[in-house]
């Protein structure tokens, strides 16, 4: 099956710093990537949708200036949490939708646990 | 807004028994449905999917049923094993790789040895 690699798996940072999370599709071209956030014992909430080479589309209530998304290539998307605060602590998960041969399936990364002190 | 929801937040089953996890969806425009399994600290893992032109689809030990009339999905796991313990999410979307996936609230499956 398709593989989506997400890095880092976990990160601890001080309040006010920025954190970058990478999401890579290893064996297919990801035309669309999605970024989700998940709080403990809750479902995945979509933050934004990014298409290669264009600006991301953010869900209502998600600050685009705080959560910077870059999808510069068909195999890499990054999420940067700028000026992180404790309330940004969460599990961030990326997913990728690929070329026609992959159909509708969405492949997920292993997630990044962000803890802001 | 429209959402996908689950009836049972927690389900406990005896090892070897069959499990049934239910899900209700409200977006009538959705035509593709997926079940995911998520273990603690990991990303969701694809289990099985079904399109709206089907009522039933079977995989290895899993079956998904779709009732479009009442907008209901179910996931059946046969001979449940301890390794099946996880949180299960149903999800729905419109066709198209660029279309976003909306997740339900999740059901935690606990398998009793």
Image: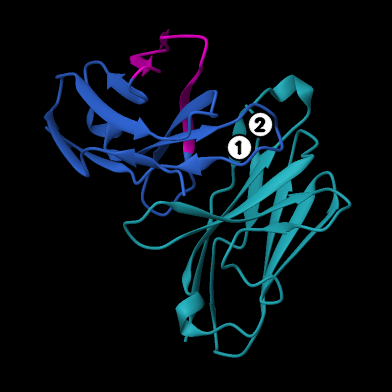
Q: Earlier in the sequence, mark 1 or mark 2?
A: 2
Instruction: Tell me the element at label 1.
Output: strand
In screen coordinates, is A52 left or right of B72?
right
Residue drawn where x is 49% and y is 55% of the image: A45
In screen coordinates, is A48 left or right of B107?
right
Q: Nearer the viewer, residue B9 or B47?
A: B9
Q: State the mark number for residue A2.
A: 2
Q: Nearer the viewer, mark 1 or mark 2?
A: 1
Q: Which chain is blue?
A: B
Q: Nearer the viewer, residue A19 or A71?
A: A71
Q: Nearer the viewer, residue B92 or A78?
A: B92
Residue drawn where x is 31% and y is 40% of the image: B86
Q: Which residues are magenta?
A: B45-69
- Colour given to chain A in the rendered image: cyan
Disc 1 target residue? A107
Prevailing SS of the magenta stretch? strand
Q: Position of residue B75 (x, y in %)?
A: 32, 23
Residue drawn where x is 26% and y is 29% of the image: B21
Asked whether the beta carbons under mark 1 and mark 2 sit within 8 Å of each other, the answer is yes
Q: Nearer the viewer, residue B56 or A74?
A: B56
Instruction: Tell me the element at label 2.
Output: loop
């Amino acid at each position: 099956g398709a593989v989506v690699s997400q890095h880092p798996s976990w990160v601890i940072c001080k309040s006010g710093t920025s954190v970058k999370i990478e999401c890579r599709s290893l064996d297919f071209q990801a035309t669309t990537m999605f970024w989700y956030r998940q709080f403990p014992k809750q479902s995945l909430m979509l933050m934004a949708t990014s298409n290669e080479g264009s600006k991301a589309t953010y869900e209502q209530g998600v600050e685009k200036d705080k959560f910077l998304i870059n999808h510069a290539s068909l195999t890499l998307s990054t999420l940067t949490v700028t000026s992180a605060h404790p309330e940004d602590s969460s599990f961030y998960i990326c997913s990728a939708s690929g070329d026609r041969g992959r159909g509708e399936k969405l492949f997920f990364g292993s997630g990044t646990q962000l803890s802001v002190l | 807004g429209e959402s996908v929801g689950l009836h049972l937040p927690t389900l406990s089953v005896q090892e070897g028994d069959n499990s049934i996890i239910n899900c209700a969806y409200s977006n009538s425009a959705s035509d593709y449905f997926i079940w995911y399994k998520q273990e603690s600290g990991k990303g969701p893992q694809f289990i099985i999917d079904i399109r709206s032109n089907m009522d039933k689809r079977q995989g290895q030990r899993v079956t998904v049923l779709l009732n479009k009339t009442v907008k209901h999905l179910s996931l059946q796991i046969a001979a449940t094993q301890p390794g099946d313990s996880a949180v299960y999410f149903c999800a729905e979307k419109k066709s198209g790789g660029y279309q976003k996936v909306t997740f339900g609230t999740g059901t935690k499956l606990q398998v009793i040895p």
